[in-house]
């Protein structure tokens, strides 16, 4: 399965929440809560990927500095982002997430943001796939 197939089950680019690097961390926290998500792509124009920022980034910075909520997103974001292309194999993305210990992988095509895949999306797909296979085997066994 390719990432494009997984994205087709999601909202596509309209579903990708982005935030400007100049936005405040308080705004970021409100955005994460509003959309019930764990990470946001940092982008000034909604297309270029300038970074990614997650709940973990906020919590880790909060442990170091209680005034992190007064910073900008650009000050706490991860500027080097692991990305995938729509034709990337899902197993490759799973391996990337496991090796790099990341939970969100933005998807870009021709340099532009076209989606995002979370570890939850991957796990849901795998569970759905296993459920389908189990049901097929059950059906086969009950026909015999």
Image (cartoon, rainbow, N blue to C red):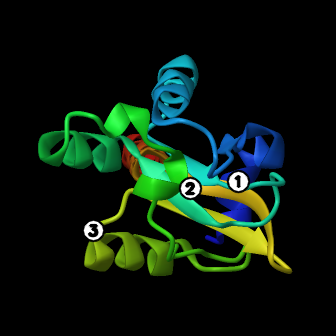
Q: What residue do we see at 57% from left, 64% from top?
A: 51
Q: Which residue is mark 2?
A: 117
Q: Which residue is mark 3?
A: 101
User: In this image, 100 relative to 21: left or right?
Assistant: left
Callout 3 touching callout 2 (CB < 8 Å): no
Q: Residues within 10 Å of mark 1 (few under 14, many from 20)?
A: some
Distance in Å between CA atoms under marks 3 and 1: 21 Å
Q: Between tags 1 and 2, which lies in front? A: 2
Q: Which residue is mark 1?
A: 7
Q: Split into 4 quadrants, where in the image is the N terminus?
A: bottom right
Counting the numbered discs, the total is: 3
User: Of 29 and 68, which appears nearest the observer?
Assistant: 68
Q: Is residue 57 above or below residue 80?
A: above
Distance in Å between CA atoms under marks 1 and 2: 7 Å
Distance in Å between CA atoms under marks 3 and 2: 14 Å
Give percent across and percent down for residue 98. 29, 72
Give percent across and percent down for residue 10. 70, 42
- Give residue 33's mark: none
Q: Between tags 3 and 2, which lies in front? A: 3
User: In this image, 46 relative to 119: left or right?
Assistant: right
Callout 1 touching callout 2 (CB < 8 Å): yes
User: In this image, 19 relative to 140: left or right?
Assistant: right
Q: Residues within 10 Å of mark 3 (few under 14, many from 20)?
A: few
């Amino acid at each position: 399965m390719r990432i494009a197939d997984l994205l087709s089950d999601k909202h596509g680019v309209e579903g990708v929440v982005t935030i400007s690097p100049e936005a405040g961390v308080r705004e970021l926290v409100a955005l994460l809560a509003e959309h019930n998500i764990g990470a946001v792509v940092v982008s000034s124009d909604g297309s270029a990927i300038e970074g990614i920022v997650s709940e973990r980034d906020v919590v880790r910075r909060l442990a170091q500095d209680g005034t992190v909520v007064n910073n900008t997103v650009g000050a706490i974001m991860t500027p080097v982002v692991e990305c995938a292309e729509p034709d990337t194999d899902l197993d490759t993305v799973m391996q990337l997430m496991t090796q790099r210990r990341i939970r969100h992988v933005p998807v870009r095509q021709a340099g532009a943001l076209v989606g995002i895949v979370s570890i939850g999306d991957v796990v849901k797909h795998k569970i759905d796939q296993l459920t389908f296979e189990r049901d097929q085997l059950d059906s086969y066994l009950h026909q015999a």
